[in-house]
Image: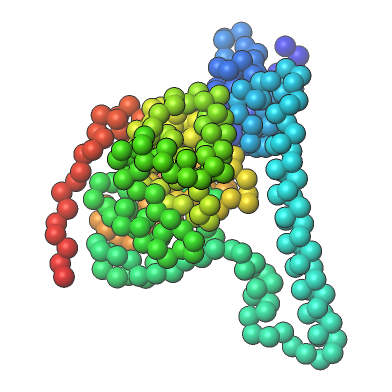
Amino acid sequence: MSSSSQFLNPAAAAQRLGVSAKALRLYEQRGLVSPNRTAAGYRAYGPDEMARAGEIVALRALGLSLAQVARVLAGDPNGLEPALAAHQATLESRLRNLADTVESVRQLRADLAQGRSPASGELARLLVPETELAVVFDLPWPWGGERFELRDIRALNYIIGPLGSGKTRLAMALAEALPNAVFLGLERLENRGAAAQSVLDADPALKARVEQTLAWLIEDGATPSDALTALLAGLESTAAIVVVDTVEQGLDHATQEAVIAHLRNRGSSSGPLFLMTRSSAILDLAAVSANEAIILCPANHSPPSRVAPYPGAPGYEAVATCLATPEVRARTEGVIAFRPPQIA
Protein backbone atom coordinates (compact mmCIF):
# COMPACT_ATOMS: atom_id res chain seq x y z
CA MET A 1 0.00 0.00 0.00
CA SER A 2 0.97 3.67 -0.36
CA SER A 3 0.44 6.17 2.44
CA SER A 4 -1.69 4.59 5.17
CA SER A 5 -3.55 7.92 5.60
CA GLN A 6 -5.19 7.30 2.21
CA PHE A 7 -6.82 4.10 3.44
CA LEU A 8 -9.97 3.89 5.54
CA ASN A 9 -11.35 1.12 7.67
CA PRO A 10 -14.90 -0.09 6.82
CA ALA A 11 -16.59 2.12 9.45
CA ALA A 12 -14.82 5.28 8.25
CA ALA A 13 -15.37 4.36 4.59
CA ALA A 14 -19.08 3.77 5.18
CA GLN A 15 -19.43 7.07 7.02
CA ARG A 16 -17.76 8.99 4.20
CA LEU A 17 -19.97 7.28 1.61
CA GLY A 18 -23.14 7.84 3.61
CA VAL A 19 -24.04 4.15 3.85
CA SER A 20 -23.84 1.51 6.57
CA ALA A 21 -20.88 -0.82 7.06
CA LYS A 22 -23.40 -3.59 6.43
CA ALA A 23 -24.04 -2.19 2.95
CA LEU A 24 -20.31 -2.16 2.23
CA ARG A 25 -20.07 -5.82 3.25
CA LEU A 26 -22.95 -6.63 0.91
CA TYR A 27 -21.19 -4.89 -1.99
CA GLU A 28 -18.10 -6.95 -1.25
CA GLN A 29 -20.10 -10.20 -1.01
CA ARG A 30 -21.56 -9.49 -4.44
CA GLY A 31 -18.08 -8.89 -5.89
CA LEU A 32 -18.80 -5.22 -6.64
CA VAL A 33 -15.87 -3.88 -4.63
CA SER A 34 -12.74 -5.56 -3.27
CA PRO A 35 -11.11 -3.75 -0.35
CA ASN A 36 -7.42 -4.12 0.35
CA ARG A 37 -6.14 -6.01 3.38
CA THR A 38 -3.71 -4.76 5.97
CA ALA A 39 -0.83 -6.89 7.19
CA ALA A 40 -3.11 -7.98 10.05
CA GLY A 41 -5.85 -8.99 7.61
CA TYR A 42 -8.22 -6.06 8.20
CA ARG A 43 -10.16 -4.50 5.33
CA ALA A 44 -8.88 -1.14 4.07
CA TYR A 45 -10.46 1.10 1.43
CA GLY A 46 -8.02 3.15 -0.63
CA PRO A 47 -8.78 5.88 -3.22
CA ASP A 48 -9.61 3.39 -5.99
CA GLU A 49 -11.91 1.32 -3.79
CA MET A 50 -13.64 4.47 -2.49
CA ALA A 51 -14.19 5.71 -6.04
CA ARG A 52 -15.65 2.33 -7.00
CA ALA A 53 -17.86 2.26 -3.90
CA GLY A 54 -19.00 5.81 -4.62
CA GLU A 55 -20.18 4.70 -8.06
CA ILE A 56 -22.10 1.83 -6.48
CA VAL A 57 -23.78 4.15 -3.96
CA ALA A 58 -24.75 6.56 -6.74
CA LEU A 59 -26.22 3.80 -8.89
CA ARG A 60 -28.15 2.43 -5.92
CA ALA A 61 -29.52 5.91 -5.23
CA LEU A 62 -30.81 5.96 -8.82
CA GLY A 63 -32.83 2.84 -8.02
CA LEU A 64 -30.72 0.09 -9.62
CA SER A 65 -30.63 -3.37 -8.12
CA LEU A 66 -27.27 -4.87 -7.20
CA ALA A 67 -27.43 -7.07 -10.28
CA GLN A 68 -28.09 -4.01 -12.45
CA VAL A 69 -25.23 -2.17 -10.74
CA ALA A 70 -22.91 -5.06 -11.55
CA ARG A 71 -23.92 -4.96 -15.22
CA VAL A 72 -23.43 -1.19 -15.47
CA LEU A 73 -20.01 -1.39 -13.83
CA ALA A 74 -19.10 -4.18 -16.25
CA GLY A 75 -19.84 -1.86 -19.19
CA ASP A 76 -23.52 -2.60 -19.95
CA PRO A 77 -25.45 0.72 -19.71
CA ASN A 78 -28.89 -0.63 -20.68
CA GLY A 79 -30.31 -0.46 -17.16
CA LEU A 80 -29.08 3.09 -16.62
CA GLU A 81 -31.28 5.04 -19.05
CA PRO A 82 -34.68 4.45 -17.34
CA ALA A 83 -33.12 5.21 -13.95
CA LEU A 84 -31.70 8.49 -15.26
CA ALA A 85 -35.04 9.32 -16.87
CA ALA A 86 -36.81 8.88 -13.53
CA HIS A 87 -34.16 10.98 -11.80
CA GLN A 88 -34.55 13.70 -14.42
CA ALA A 89 -38.32 13.74 -13.86
CA THR A 90 -37.76 14.17 -10.12
CA LEU A 91 -35.33 17.03 -10.65
CA GLU A 92 -37.69 18.74 -13.10
CA SER A 93 -40.51 18.47 -10.55
CA ARG A 94 -38.31 20.13 -7.92
CA LEU A 95 -37.38 22.82 -10.44
CA ARG A 96 -41.04 23.59 -11.13
CA ASN A 97 -41.75 23.84 -7.40
CA LEU A 98 -38.76 26.14 -6.95
CA ALA A 99 -39.89 28.32 -9.86
CA ASP A 100 -43.35 28.62 -8.27
CA THR A 101 -41.74 29.68 -4.98
CA VAL A 102 -39.57 32.28 -6.73
CA GLU A 103 -42.67 33.67 -8.43
CA SER A 104 -44.44 33.91 -5.06
CA VAL A 105 -41.50 35.84 -3.61
CA ARG A 106 -41.48 38.17 -6.62
CA GLN A 107 -45.20 38.83 -6.20
CA LEU A 108 -44.81 39.54 -2.49
CA ARG A 109 -42.07 42.06 -3.21
CA ALA A 110 -44.24 43.73 -5.86
CA ASP A 111 -47.09 43.96 -3.33
CA LEU A 112 -44.78 45.48 -0.74
CA ALA A 113 -43.65 48.09 -3.27
CA GLN A 114 -47.32 49.03 -3.66
CA GLY A 115 -47.75 49.28 0.09
CA ARG A 116 -49.67 46.01 0.47
CA SER A 117 -48.72 43.75 3.38
CA PRO A 118 -48.71 39.93 2.99
CA ALA A 119 -51.99 38.23 3.76
CA SER A 120 -52.32 36.17 6.93
CA GLY A 121 -50.36 32.92 6.60
CA GLU A 122 -48.75 33.89 3.30
CA LEU A 123 -45.22 34.12 4.67
CA ALA A 124 -45.66 30.85 6.56
CA ARG A 125 -46.74 29.09 3.36
CA LEU A 126 -43.71 30.55 1.61
CA LEU A 127 -41.26 29.22 4.22
CA VAL A 128 -43.06 25.90 4.79
CA PRO A 129 -44.29 24.42 1.49
CA GLU A 130 -47.93 23.39 1.40
CA THR A 131 -46.81 19.97 0.25
CA GLU A 132 -45.17 19.31 3.64
CA LEU A 133 -47.28 16.74 5.44
CA ALA A 134 -48.35 17.06 9.03
CA VAL A 135 -51.00 15.23 11.02
CA VAL A 136 -52.74 15.98 14.30
CA PHE A 137 -55.36 13.75 15.94
CA ASP A 138 -56.54 12.34 19.28
CA LEU A 139 -54.78 9.11 20.15
CA PRO A 140 -56.97 5.99 20.36
CA TRP A 141 -57.11 3.59 23.29
CA PRO A 142 -54.91 2.69 25.20
CA TRP A 143 -53.66 6.29 25.39
CA GLY A 144 -56.94 7.79 26.50
CA GLY A 145 -57.38 10.60 24.00
CA GLU A 146 -54.10 12.52 24.27
CA ARG A 147 -53.40 14.83 21.33
CA PHE A 148 -50.79 13.49 18.91
CA GLU A 149 -48.94 15.71 16.45
CA LEU A 150 -46.51 14.52 13.81
CA ARG A 151 -44.74 17.00 11.56
CA ASP A 152 -41.85 16.76 9.11
CA ILE A 153 -43.04 13.37 7.92
CA ARG A 154 -40.17 11.47 6.28
CA ALA A 155 -40.09 9.17 3.26
CA LEU A 156 -39.79 6.11 5.55
CA ASN A 157 -41.35 6.12 9.02
CA TYR A 158 -40.95 3.10 11.28
CA ILE A 159 -43.53 2.37 13.96
CA ILE A 160 -41.94 0.28 16.66
CA GLY A 161 -42.98 -0.94 20.09
CA PRO A 162 -43.23 -4.07 22.25
CA LEU A 163 -46.19 -6.42 22.15
CA GLY A 164 -49.30 -4.75 23.53
CA SER A 165 -47.91 -1.22 23.14
CA GLY A 166 -50.73 -0.08 20.86
CA LYS A 167 -48.62 0.40 17.73
CA THR A 168 -51.25 -1.26 15.50
CA ARG A 169 -53.90 1.15 16.75
CA LEU A 170 -51.55 4.07 16.17
CA ALA A 171 -50.85 2.85 12.63
CA MET A 172 -54.56 2.54 11.86
CA ALA A 173 -55.25 5.98 13.32
CA LEU A 174 -52.48 7.47 11.18
CA ALA A 175 -53.97 5.86 8.06
CA GLU A 176 -57.35 7.40 8.92
CA ALA A 177 -55.92 10.86 9.64
CA LEU A 178 -53.50 11.21 6.72
CA PRO A 179 -54.91 12.28 3.32
CA ASN A 180 -55.26 9.56 0.67
CA ALA A 181 -53.67 6.94 2.91
CA VAL A 182 -54.39 3.21 3.03
CA PHE A 183 -53.74 0.70 5.80
CA LEU A 184 -52.16 -2.54 4.55
CA GLY A 185 -53.01 -5.01 7.29
CA LEU A 186 -52.15 -8.65 7.87
CA GLU A 187 -55.30 -9.72 6.03
CA ARG A 188 -53.10 -9.40 2.95
CA LEU A 189 -51.64 -12.78 4.01
CA GLU A 190 -55.02 -14.55 4.01
CA ASN A 191 -55.58 -16.46 0.77
CA ARG A 192 -52.80 -14.23 -0.46
CA GLY A 193 -51.99 -16.10 -3.66
CA ALA A 194 -55.44 -16.01 -5.20
CA ALA A 195 -56.41 -12.66 -3.70
CA ALA A 196 -53.28 -10.84 -4.81
CA GLN A 197 -53.41 -12.35 -8.28
CA SER A 198 -57.05 -11.32 -8.63
CA VAL A 199 -56.16 -7.73 -7.75
CA LEU A 200 -53.26 -7.70 -10.21
CA ASP A 201 -55.30 -9.23 -13.05
CA ALA A 202 -57.90 -6.50 -12.60
CA ASP A 203 -55.29 -3.75 -12.94
CA PRO A 204 -52.73 -4.34 -15.73
CA ALA A 205 -50.77 -1.18 -14.84
CA LEU A 206 -50.43 -2.29 -11.21
CA LYS A 207 -49.48 -5.79 -12.35
CA ALA A 208 -46.69 -4.37 -14.52
CA ARG A 209 -45.33 -2.30 -11.62
CA VAL A 210 -45.41 -5.27 -9.27
CA GLU A 211 -43.67 -7.53 -11.78
CA GLN A 212 -40.98 -4.93 -12.39
CA THR A 213 -40.37 -4.45 -8.68
CA LEU A 214 -40.41 -8.20 -8.05
CA ALA A 215 -37.74 -8.70 -10.72
CA TRP A 216 -35.64 -5.96 -9.07
CA LEU A 217 -35.98 -7.64 -5.66
CA ILE A 218 -35.14 -11.11 -6.96
CA GLU A 219 -31.97 -9.71 -8.52
CA ASP A 220 -31.16 -8.33 -5.07
CA GLY A 221 -31.53 -11.74 -3.46
CA ALA A 222 -35.23 -11.86 -2.52
CA THR A 223 -37.15 -15.14 -2.51
CA PRO A 224 -40.36 -15.05 -4.57
CA SER A 225 -43.44 -15.83 -2.49
CA ASP A 226 -47.14 -15.11 -2.25
CA ALA A 227 -46.44 -12.98 0.83
CA LEU A 228 -43.99 -10.81 -1.12
CA THR A 229 -46.37 -10.42 -4.05
CA ALA A 230 -49.21 -9.43 -1.70
CA LEU A 231 -46.98 -6.85 -0.04
CA LEU A 232 -45.89 -5.38 -3.36
CA ALA A 233 -49.48 -5.20 -4.59
CA GLY A 234 -50.23 -2.92 -1.65
CA LEU A 235 -47.02 -0.89 -1.84
CA GLU A 236 -47.33 -0.30 -5.58
CA SER A 237 -50.93 0.88 -5.35
CA THR A 238 -51.78 4.42 -6.35
CA ALA A 239 -52.35 5.46 -2.74
CA ALA A 240 -50.38 8.57 -1.77
CA ILE A 241 -49.47 7.11 1.62
CA VAL A 242 -49.30 3.47 2.70
CA VAL A 243 -49.25 2.28 6.31
CA VAL A 244 -48.05 -1.34 6.54
CA ASP A 245 -48.71 -3.69 9.45
CA THR A 246 -45.66 -5.91 10.20
CA VAL A 247 -43.98 -5.41 6.84
CA GLU A 248 -41.64 -8.39 7.39
CA GLN A 249 -44.43 -10.95 7.88
CA GLY A 250 -43.84 -14.04 5.74
CA LEU A 251 -40.52 -12.81 4.31
CA ASP A 252 -37.16 -14.47 4.90
CA HIS A 253 -34.00 -12.57 5.90
CA ALA A 254 -32.67 -11.97 2.38
CA THR A 255 -36.08 -10.83 1.17
CA GLN A 256 -36.45 -8.38 4.05
CA GLU A 257 -33.07 -6.86 3.24
CA ALA A 258 -33.97 -6.57 -0.45
CA VAL A 259 -37.35 -4.99 0.37
CA ILE A 260 -35.96 -2.29 2.65
CA ALA A 261 -33.17 -1.51 0.15
CA HIS A 262 -35.83 -1.05 -2.53
CA LEU A 263 -37.98 1.16 -0.30
CA ARG A 264 -34.99 3.34 0.52
CA ASN A 265 -34.35 3.79 -3.20
CA ARG A 266 -37.92 4.83 -4.06
CA GLY A 267 -38.17 8.10 -5.91
CA SER A 268 -38.91 11.29 -3.99
CA SER A 269 -42.16 11.60 -5.96
CA SER A 270 -43.53 8.56 -4.12
CA GLY A 271 -45.60 9.17 -1.01
CA PRO A 272 -44.28 8.47 2.49
CA LEU A 273 -44.49 5.00 3.98
CA PHE A 274 -45.22 4.01 7.57
CA LEU A 275 -43.81 0.57 8.34
CA MET A 276 -44.72 -1.33 11.49
CA THR A 277 -41.81 -3.63 12.21
CA ARG A 278 -39.90 -5.49 14.89
CA SER A 279 -37.24 -6.85 12.53
CA SER A 280 -33.65 -5.64 12.73
CA ALA A 281 -33.30 -6.37 9.00
CA ILE A 282 -36.04 -3.87 8.17
CA LEU A 283 -35.04 -1.31 10.81
CA ASP A 284 -31.25 -1.39 10.91
CA LEU A 285 -30.49 1.32 13.46
CA ALA A 286 -27.02 1.82 11.99
CA ALA A 287 -28.46 2.55 8.53
CA VAL A 288 -31.23 5.06 9.28
CA SER A 289 -30.79 8.12 7.06
CA ALA A 290 -32.09 11.69 7.20
CA ASN A 291 -35.08 10.58 5.11
CA GLU A 292 -36.22 8.12 7.78
CA ALA A 293 -37.83 8.48 11.19
CA ILE A 294 -38.57 6.12 14.10
CA ILE A 295 -41.81 6.42 16.07
CA LEU A 296 -41.79 4.52 19.37
CA CYS A 297 -44.91 3.33 21.19
CA PRO A 298 -43.61 2.85 24.77
CA ALA A 299 -44.53 -0.20 26.81
CA ASN A 300 -46.03 1.99 29.54
CA HIS A 301 -48.48 3.59 27.08
CA SER A 302 -46.90 7.00 27.27
CA PRO A 303 -47.72 8.96 24.09
CA PRO A 304 -45.78 7.82 21.01
CA SER A 305 -42.68 9.86 20.27
CA ARG A 306 -40.02 10.20 17.62
CA VAL A 307 -36.68 8.62 18.52
CA ALA A 308 -33.33 9.70 17.12
CA PRO A 309 -31.28 6.74 15.80
CA TYR A 310 -28.30 7.38 18.05
CA PRO A 311 -27.18 5.50 21.17
CA GLY A 312 -28.03 7.57 24.21
CA ALA A 313 -30.98 9.35 22.60
CA PRO A 314 -34.25 9.17 24.58
CA GLY A 315 -36.03 5.95 23.65
CA TYR A 316 -33.14 4.49 21.66
CA GLU A 317 -32.54 1.55 24.01
CA ALA A 318 -36.28 0.76 24.06
CA VAL A 319 -36.31 0.65 20.25
CA ALA A 320 -33.21 -1.56 20.15
CA THR A 321 -34.79 -3.93 22.68
CA CYS A 322 -37.93 -4.29 20.54
CA LEU A 323 -35.98 -5.37 17.47
CA ALA A 324 -34.95 -8.94 16.70
CA THR A 325 -33.31 -10.75 13.81
CA PRO A 326 -35.60 -12.23 11.14
CA GLU A 327 -34.81 -15.73 12.45
CA VAL A 328 -36.06 -14.82 15.94
CA ARG A 329 -39.07 -13.02 14.50
CA ALA A 330 -39.95 -16.15 12.51
CA ARG A 331 -39.88 -18.27 15.69
CA THR A 332 -42.24 -15.89 17.48
CA GLU A 333 -44.59 -15.31 14.54
CA GLY A 334 -48.20 -15.28 15.66
CA VAL A 335 -47.44 -14.60 19.32
CA ILE A 336 -50.04 -12.20 20.72
CA ALA A 337 -49.72 -10.36 24.00
CA PHE A 338 -52.61 -10.36 26.48
CA ARG A 339 -54.70 -7.24 26.05
CA PRO A 340 -57.28 -6.22 28.68
CA PRO A 341 -60.75 -5.37 27.42
CA GLN A 342 -61.32 -1.76 26.47
CA ILE A 343 -63.32 0.16 29.04
CA ALA A 344 -66.25 2.02 27.52
Q: Is residue 236 above or below residue 179?
A: above
**Residue that lies at the very extreme toward the top in this rendered image:** 39
- Residue at image location 72% in from the left, 55% down from the top: 93
- Residue at image location 67% in from the left, 79% down from the top: 122
Instruction: State the residue in front, 109 or 250.
Output: 250
From the top left corner, tell me how far across and down residue 68 is, in percent: 65, 25
Residue 254 visible (yes or no) = no
Instruction: State the residue in front, 107 or 312.
Output: 107
> Which image quarter: residue 87?
top right
Instruction: State the residue in front, 105 or 51.
Output: 105
From the top left corner, tell me how far across and down residue 86 is, in percent: 70, 43
> Which image quarter: residue 148?
bottom left
Question: Horizontally, is 6 left or right of 154 in the view?
Answer: right
- Residue at image location 54% in from the left, 60% down from the top: 152
Instruction: State the residue in front, 252 or 139.
Output: 252
Question: Horizontally, is 210 left or right of 244 in the view?
Answer: right
Residue 242 visible (yes or no) = yes
**Residue that lies at the very extreme toward the front in this rendered image:** 202
**Residue that lies at the very extreme toward the bottom in this rendered image:** 115
Question: Horizontally, is 28 left or right of 307 in the view?
Answer: right
From the top left corner, tell me how far across and down residue 112 is, in percent: 81, 85
From the top left corner, tell me how far across and down residue 99 is, in percent: 79, 64
Quadrant in the picture for the C terminus = bottom left
Quadrant in the picture for the N terminus = top right
Question: Horizontally, is 94 left or right of 141 in the view?
Answer: right
Q: How many marks?
A: 0
- Residue at image location 65% in from the left, 67% down from the top: 129
State the colouring used for the structure image. Answer: rainbow
Q: Is residue 2 above or below residue 257?
A: above
> Which image quarter: residue 111?
bottom right
Q: Is residue 132 above or below residue 14?
A: below
